Amino acid sequence: MRKNKKINSWSIVLFISLMILVVMGLISNALEIGERLGNVHIAIEILFYVLIAVVVIVGIIYPLVGVFFAPIFSLEKLHNADGTARQKWCKRLVKNLLENVDLTPEEQEEVKGFLALEDSTDDKLIEFFDRKITPELNSEIYDIAKKIFIITAVSQNSVYDMLGMASANFSLIKRIVEICGFRPSNAQVLRIYTRVLSMTLLAGSLEDMDIEELIPMVTEGALGKALGILAASAAQGAVNALTTLRIAAITKNYLLNADVSLTRKELRKKSYAEALNILKNIVKQSMDEKVKEPVKNFFGRNKTALE
């Protein structure tokens, strides 16, 4: 167990390698766009580079580094610790609840009272923390994933997809840590960040693939081309949203999973099932908002006009 929590040197090499690839990909794509903008006016090109730099600093570097300032903790520690150490973690969790969760005065007193329960303190705290924190985390995760689904489905440029994916995922991880009041271990954070970088590269590569060319091979003509474009955009958005949901689910499970019997493989499967379930709701809601409702309103107006 302890060995798994140590940062493997190969993990660091992989993280740095992926970081270099992402930076090179962003620079390459940004220079290509900047050159085209420079043909219009040099000031527009400079402004574009400034905007890219601001997004990278505010949306990627700041949330990436900011996570490391939070204390390392997880609900699992409450079950692994005993005696003085257990009391220490229980007090820390109470402090996190009081500082990071919007509680009523009655709930604040209830939380403080848990510390006097001794043997059942950890169980009561875990149940209360999970009940109050999980809905807030799920709401934040859902909103970010939905934005990624829509933005990357509409975007037709790899640099925007890469920037959007990296910024959204690093910011979401930081937000999850802020809501909980603590972060995973250094090894776990490195694994999460490595996954983010690999998914960022995937987001960029999806734009270079002509997915829309596959459907017209089966469906002939202009209809096939239109279906291909729509399907490709939806597929790109869905893949990017699913990766964000998985990263968020893994981060959340690292922090909130109090079941020490679950293996890493079981946690990954649990995270995937959770992410897929949320994605189905996002796709359904987005289709209702972007397709079904406009069509329904259009035909509704026509029907009223005919009457």
Image (cartoon, rainbow, N blue to C red):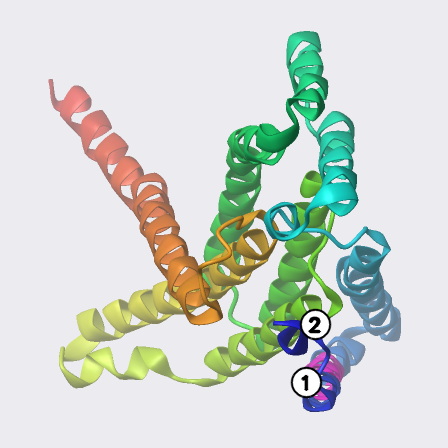
Q: Is residue 229 above or below residue 33?
A: above
- Rendered location of residue 8, percent (x, y): 70, 85
Q: Is residue 158 above or below residue 8?
A: above
- Identify the amino acid type marked 1: Ser
Question: Secondary structure under badge 2?
Answer: helix
Mark 1 and mark 2 residues within 8 Å of each other at the beta carbon:
yes
Give the CA distance from mark 1 to mark 2. 9 Å
- Rendered location of residue 84, percent (x, y): 79, 42
Residue numbers of the magenta segment: 18-31
* Residue 57: quarter of image: bottom right
User: Dot 1, how many residues are within 10 Å of its Cα: few (below 14), some (14-19), or many (20+)?
Assistant: some
**Chief SS of the magenta region:** helix
Viewer-proximal residue among 295 and 113 = 113
Q: Residue at x 47, y 79 (%)?
A: 206
In the figure, is residue 284 to the left or right of 242? Answer: left
In the figure, is residue 215 to the left or right of 102? Answer: left
Task: Give the residue number, with chain letter if any, for mark 2.
Answer: 187
Q: Residue at x 57, y 47 (%)?
A: 256
Viewer-proximal residue among 280 and 236 = 280
Q: Earlier in the sequence, mark 1 or mark 2?
A: 1
In the figure, is residue 200 to the left or right of 232? Answer: right
Q: Quadrant of the C terminus?
A: top left
- Residue 11, label in figure: 1
Q: Residue at x 54, y 36 (%)?
A: 130
Indicate yes or no whether the magenta region holds residue 49.
Answer: no
* Residue 120: quarter of image: top right
Residue at the left extreme, as displayed: 307
Viewer-proximal residue among 267 and 25 = 267
